[in-house]
């Protein structure tokens, strides 16, 4: 992929972000200007809890935050390597309209090899870092689909990577090792007790299939759905939940 083409992709991203900040894509539930992969991930755990947390949170997605993402796009354009034949990592937000829902996310980095996306990398601090939950899978697939809709050069070889560790320092070590592994190559990432490197293959059809029901909620096509389980007993919204009476955990 030529440098100019990647510059064009970033420019299209900038224009879409600016349109979102102007409110050109409206009418999501609860008046949100856009949603994020993190919101979709929380929906996959328990949509009812995710929605009420979002409504009551001061950190809801805002147009002003989207404007900050525009600045990051401009910075990425300035620091884009002149030659794309080798390995490099790009720090840039991703934005796309997916099933009429504006989504913005910022992965830890997008790793390129010879002009193509080798991996999209995100990180997470978790006590149970060895497990890949459905919420993690949703978040990874959301970034994969964002990159595809943003017209980045992806393929079946593109990996969606989650580096997970139980402390921030161990996470940083895991991210460093991940980038070394991606640069050197190899079928499987190194293993460690300190962190876990999870990876999935990019599959646009599978990503759309998993995310479509979640996106339908934001278009106002259905109500939020609770996901009952042992976690309900500590949920701050259990008294509001329609399943609170019949399900006692």
Image (cartoon, rainbow, N blue to C red):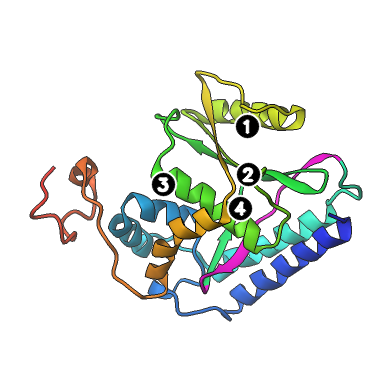
> Which residue in the structure is indicated by mark 1?
175
Report which quarter residue 204 is drawn in.
Answer: bottom right
Residue 135's label in the rendered image is 3
Residue with the most extreme right position: 82
Q: Is residue 128 visible?
A: yes
The magenta span reads 86-100
Q: Secondary structure at mark 1?
A: helix
Give the vertical position of 41 relative to 88 (above or below). Answer: below
Q: Is residue 34 above or below residue 230?
A: below
Comes first in the chain, label 2 or label 1: 2
In the image, is residue 219 part of the stretch drawn in magenta?
Answer: no
SS state under label 3: helix
| Residue under numbered circle 2 | 108
Mark 2 touching mark 1, by CB under 8 A?
yes
**Which residue is found at the position 77% from the left and 61% from the top?**
74
C-alpha gap between disc 1 and disc 3: 20 Å
Q: Left or right of 163: which side holds 213?
A: left
| Residue that protrudes farthest toward the left in the picture | 246
**Separation of marks 2 and 1 at Cα, in angstroms:** 9 Å
């Amino acid at each position: 992929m030529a440098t100019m083409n990647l510059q064009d992709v970033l420019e299209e991203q900038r224009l879409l972000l600016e349109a979102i900040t102007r409110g050109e894509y409206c009418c999501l539930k609860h008046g949100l200007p856009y949603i994020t992969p993190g919101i979709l991930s929380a929906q996959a755990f328990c949509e009812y809890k995710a929605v009420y947390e979002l409504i009551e949170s001061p950190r809801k997605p805002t147009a002003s935050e989207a404007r900050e993402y525009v600045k990051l796009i401009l910075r990425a354009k300035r620091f884009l390597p002149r030659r794309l034949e080798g390995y490099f990592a790009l720090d840039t937000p991703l934005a796309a309209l997916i099933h009429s829902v504006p989504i913005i996310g910022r992965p830890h980095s997008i790793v390129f090899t010879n002009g193509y996306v080798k991996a999209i990398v995100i990180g997470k601090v978790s006590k149970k870092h060895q497990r890949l939950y459905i919420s993690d899978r949703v978040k990874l697939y959301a970034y994969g689909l964002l990159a595809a809709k943003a017209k980045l050069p992806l393929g079946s070889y593109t990996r969606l990577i989650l580096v997970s560790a139980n402390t921030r320092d161990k996470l940083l070590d895991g991210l460093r090792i991940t980038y070394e592994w991606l640069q050197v190559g190899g079928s499987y990432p190194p293993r460690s007790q300190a962190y876990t490197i999870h990876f999935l293959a990019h599959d646009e059809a599978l990503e759309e299939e998993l995310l479509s029901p979640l996106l339908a909620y934001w278009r106002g096509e259905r109500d939020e759905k609770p996901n009952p389980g042992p976690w309900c007993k500590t949920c701050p919204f259990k008294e509001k939940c329609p399943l609170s009476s019949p399900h006692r955990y």
